[in-house]
Image (spheres, rainbow, N blue to C red):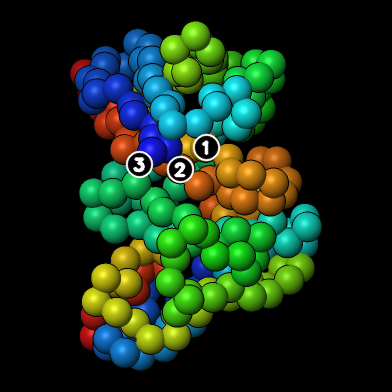
């Protein structure tokens, strides 16, 4: 069964950093790009960027450049997303999602990780 | 950046009725790389349609997608009770990838 399982909820203070993990199972981890998408409370979906586990290539949304880093550990089939200098409007559910096969969009999603930024 | 505008914002329909959801792009979507997702409260989005009209695995055939260029449509031929949810379109042909603001399909 193909799955993405994310780490648990986090509460952080403004200015801090958070790292969310996303462990893949049921498929060859290095064969599919992982995207990160977030959703503020009651709002829509925002793409944050992607990472290709095969070679570590990344592509970040411009508005997050300099604050976000995406990495992978192929030994454990885990993707990580770190967001730095947190602000209150970074409060959101963070999802990892797998790119599907050729021309297929985000076919497998993690369950989401709630990140709350509050003083 | 390609801006996706979904309409209507809310669609109030009864089970058994037909739902037609629109997604309009500010620029032509590369290779018709337009997807639709369904999201229910407290759940992650679920892929319905890729590449404008290709249903994802396990998606019933009452869901269909159409369109090209800048205008795309998701049609639910006969609404089932489990179809009441929020629907998002996404273009994934050009970076940055972008999502529409969503259409909520609610029970009338």
Q: Position of residue A64 (x, y in %)?
A: 55, 26
- Secondary structure under tag 3 reads loop
Question: Which residue corresponds to mark 3?
Answer: A40
**Could you classify mark 2 by the number of other residues whose Cα lies within 10 Å: few (under 14), some (14-19), or many (20 or more)?**
many
Q: Nearer the viewer, mark 3 or mark 2?
A: 2
Quadrant placement of the N terminus of chain A:
top left
- Return the disc, 3 or 1, that comes first in the chain's sequence: 3
Tell which subunit mark 3 falls on. A
- Residue B99 higher or lower than B61, as above or below: above
Residue plotted at (77% across, 55% down): B30
Which of the 4 image quadrants contains residue A114? top left
- Secondary structure under tag 1 reads strand
Question: Which residue corresponds to mark 2?
Answer: A108
Residue A36 can be seen in this image: no
Residue plotted at (38% across, 15% down): A19
Question: Which residue corresponds to mark 1?
Answer: A98
Q: Position of residue B26 (x, y in %)?
A: 70, 62
- Residue A78 higher or lower than B42, as above or below: above
Q: Position of residue A50 (x, y in %)?
A: 59, 30
User: Viewed as shown, does residue B96 lie left or right of B11?
Assistant: right
Whether labels 3 and 1 share one chain: yes
């Amino acid at each position: 069964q193909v799955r993405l399982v994310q780490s648990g909820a986090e509460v952080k203070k403004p200015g801090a950093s958070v790292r969310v993990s996303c462990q893949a199972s049921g498929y060859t981890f290095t064969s599919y790009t992982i995207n990160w998408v977030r959703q503020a409370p009651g709002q829509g979906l925002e793409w944050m960027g992607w990472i290709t586990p095969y070679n570590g290539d990344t592509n970040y949304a411009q508005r997050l450049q300099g604050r976000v880093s995406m990495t992978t550990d192929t030994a454990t089939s885990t993707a990580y997303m770190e967001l730095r200098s947190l602000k209150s409007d970074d409060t959101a559910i963070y999802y990892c999602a797998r790119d599907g096969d050729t021309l297929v969009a985000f076919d497998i999603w993690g369950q989401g990780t709630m990140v709350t930024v509050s003083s | 950046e390609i801006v996706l505008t979904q309409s209507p914002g809310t669609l109030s329909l009864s089970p058994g009725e037909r739902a037609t959801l629109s997604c309009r792009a500010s620029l032509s979507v590369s290779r018709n790389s337009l997807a639709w997702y369904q999201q229910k409260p407290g759940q992650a989005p679920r892929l319905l349609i890729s590449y404008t009209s290709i249903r994802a695995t396990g998606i019933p055939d009452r869901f269909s997608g159409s369109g090209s260029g800048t205008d795309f449509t998701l049609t639910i031929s006969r609404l089932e009770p489990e179809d009441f949810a929020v629907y998002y379109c996404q273009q994934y042909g050009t970076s940055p990838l972008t999502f529409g603001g969503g259409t909520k399909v609610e029970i009338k």
